[in-house]
Amino acid sequence: MDYSYESEHTKFIRELLDKNPTLEKKREEARNIWWEKKLNKEEQQRFKESSVPMKPYVYFGGE
């Protein structure tokens, strides 16, 4: 079986990365803005303590 097939999409991405060597670094920096955050344990605790428990059956109006 021939495993040397490469899709058009794979070729495009590989060529794009070859032409733009800084693209991977820019992608990583952009990802770090949203995802790679340091967690503040004290702030998380405050959020947890300040949350108000949801009442049961919030979609029904009557008591």
Image (cartoon, rainbow, N blue to C red):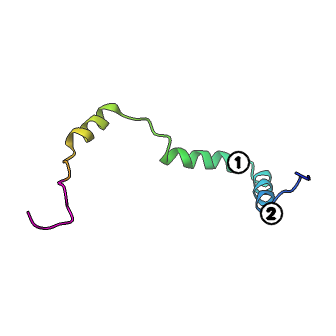
Instruction: State the separation of the CA atoms marked 2 and 1.
Output: 22 Å
Residue depicted at 75% across the width and 48% down the height: 21
> In terms of depth relative to the viewer, which is nearer, 45 or 54?
54
Q: How many marks?
A: 2
Q: Residue furthest bottom?
A: 61
Q: Which residues are magenta?
A: 55-63
Quadrant in the picture for the C terminus = bottom left
- Quarter of the image for residue 60 reads bottom left
Q: Residue at x 24, y 37 (%)?
A: 46
Q: Amino acid at mark 2?
A: Glu
Residue closest to the far top? 41
Disc ID at residue 8: 2
x and y, in percent, of residue 18 in the image: 80, 51
Secondary structure state at the residue bearing disc 1: loop
Q: Is residue 1 magenta?
A: no
Q: Position of residue 4 (x, y in %)?
A: 89, 52
In the rendered view, would you say 49 is above or below 62? above
Q: Which residue is mark 1?
A: 22
